[in-house]
Amino acid sequence: MHNNTLLTVNASNSANSIILDTMTLVFPEWTTLVANSSNQALEKANTTSIQWAFIDYDLPDTNGLELAINFRLLYPAARITLLAGQYNPGIHGLAAQMNVEILYKPVDERGLLSLLPKSA
């Protein structure tokens, strides 16, 4: 049996909590992982197959778009959601080129649920 894994990469405990609580309700069978930096995230990604990553743009050791590029190279088919504070055409354009969706902060259940297919 294949186990799906969701990774949230965010320095904010409250955002991590909202993401994990909401996604666990929708996907109770998924494994969830948390990383507080890009280094932690890459360590986890090198040992566990990631199907969906939520990456904060504002990480303490890099910007989330750079981490998303690394994730895209490791997992070309993974779903990647970048958490951004405000609309920025440059970030939006690069994210679109990499097939990375953007969820604008503040992260809440409604925004997370809007990412799901209607059948979920």
Image (cartoon, rainbow, N blue to C red):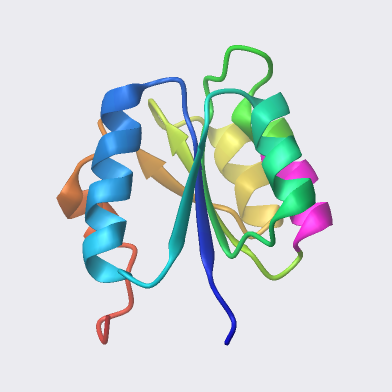
Residue 105 shows in the view: no
- Rendered image quadrant of residue 103: top left
Q: What residue lies at 79% left-to-right and 43% top-to-bottom?
A: 70
Q: Quadrant of the N terminus?
A: bottom right
Image label count: 0
Q: What residue lies at 46% left-to-right and 47% top-to-bottom?
A: 102
Residue 92 shows in the view: yes
Give, as a single range, the part of the protein colored magenta: 68-75
Q: What residue lies at 26% left-to-right and 87% top-to-bottom?
A: 119
Q: Quadrant of the C terminus?
A: bottom left
Q: Is residue 71 magenta?
A: yes
Q: Is residue 81 magenta?
A: no
Rendering coords of residue 45 (x, y %): 71, 48
Q: Relative to 92, does residue 78 appear above or below in the rendering?
A: below
Rendering coords of residue 25 (x, y %): 21, 64
Rendering coords of residue 101 (x, y %): 50, 54
Rendering coords of residue 89 (x, y %): 55, 35
Give the residue at the far top of this rendering.
60
Give the residue at the far right of this rendering.
73
Closest to the observer, 31 or 118: 31
Q: What residue lies at 33% left-to-right and 70% top-to-bottom?
A: 27
From the viewer's perspective, tell me whether residue 21 is left or right of residue 59: left
From the viewer's perspective, tell me whether residue 27 is left or right of residue 67: left
From the viewer's perspective, tell me whether residue 38 is left or right of residue 9: right
Give the residue at the far left of this rendering.
110
- Rendered image quadrant of residue 64: top right
Magenta: main secondary structure equals: helix
Q: Relative to 85, does residue 108 appear above or below in the rendering?
A: below
